Image (cartoon, rainbow, N blue to C red):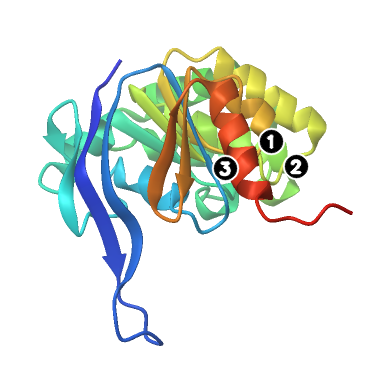
Amino acid sequence: MATISFRGTSVAVVVDSHPEPKTLLQDVSLELTEQRIGVIGANGSGKSTLLRMINGLVQPTSGTVLVDGADTVGAVRAVRRQVGFVFTDPLSQLVMPTGREDVELSLRRTVRNGQERRRLAEASLDRFGLLPLADQSIYELSGGERQLMALAAVLAVNPSVLVLDEPSTLLDLRNRELLRRTLSGLDQQVIMSTHDLDLALDMDRVLVIEAGRVMFDGGPAAAVDAYRAVATQGLATP
């Protein structure tokens, strides 16, 4: 497993309507080494910011983020070869007309031979049962099929770390279960934010993010209990 290190990491952004920068994450220090790591918390808590820092999509305002010692700012290309990222909405990630073309595009930088790219793309699609859909328009696919296409494109280049930002948000029950089983069978280290607490319970370690800080870090059942307590605090009994 990779070692992902957050060392005194903070992120602040300037918002037009506010005179002072808005803090999205504050003083996060973590060493992430487990194979399955979940991140839960309310909307706007900082989950996506935390995940996007792992492959340099967001840069820290202060502190550092390292992936096996490689800095996500100074060595971002090396980091992105190791870390694959899957967005919440696969349509923001699938840029080609068909899944086959998208997977081949992801391989273009590392595989120069066109026939070999086609072979590897088909192998990646077949792994997820997507080969019969390879040449369909991505707009004809279901939400679950699109999400799996995006996953196939990311995994085709064989990253050692897979980061997923709320991957089950747009899925129905069947496709959510398909995604769950797919993730459980991967060799990659998986770091995933989710509102689905059943998915969180599948993890080895779960972080609870609240107002830009890690307010709990531990086993999945205890983390879910901690999050429920925070989320329901102050709610009136009906």
Q: Residue at x 48, y 17 (%)?
A: 204
Q: On screen, 214 above or below 18?
A: above
Residue picked out by circle 1: 145
Q: Residues within 10 Å of mark 3 (few under 14, many from 20)?
A: many
Res. 167 visible in picture = no
Please indicate whether residue 29 sits to the left or right of residue 191 in the image: left
Label 3 sits on what residue type?
Glu
Please indicate whether residue 11 sits to the left or right of residue 208 in the image: left
How far apart are the alpha carbons under marks 2 and 3?
17 Å
Percent x, y of residue 116? 37, 22
Q: Quadrant of the N terminus?
A: top left
Q: Quadrant of residue 64?
A: top left
Mark before the other along the chain sequence, 2 or 3: 2
Q: Residues within 10 Å of mark 1 (few under 14, many from 20)?
A: many
Percent x, y of residue 237? 84, 52
- Given residues 89 and 10, the one toward you in this image is 10
Residue picked out by circle 2: 142
Label 1, secondary structure: give it.
Answer: helix
Percent x, y of residue 115? 40, 24
Please indicate whether residue 85 sits to the left or right of residue 226 in the image: left
Q: Residue at x 43, y 53 (%)?
A: 46
Label 2, secondary structure: give it.
Answer: loop
Label 2 sits on what residue type?
Ser
Q: Are marks 2 and 1 in contact (CB under 8 Å)?
A: yes
How far apart are the alpha carbons under marks 2 and 1?
5 Å
Res. 113 visible in picture = yes
Residue picked out by circle 3: 166
Q: On screen, 63 above or below 173?
A: below
Mark before the other along the chain sequence, 3 or 1: 1
Q: Quadrant of residue 23?
A: bottom left
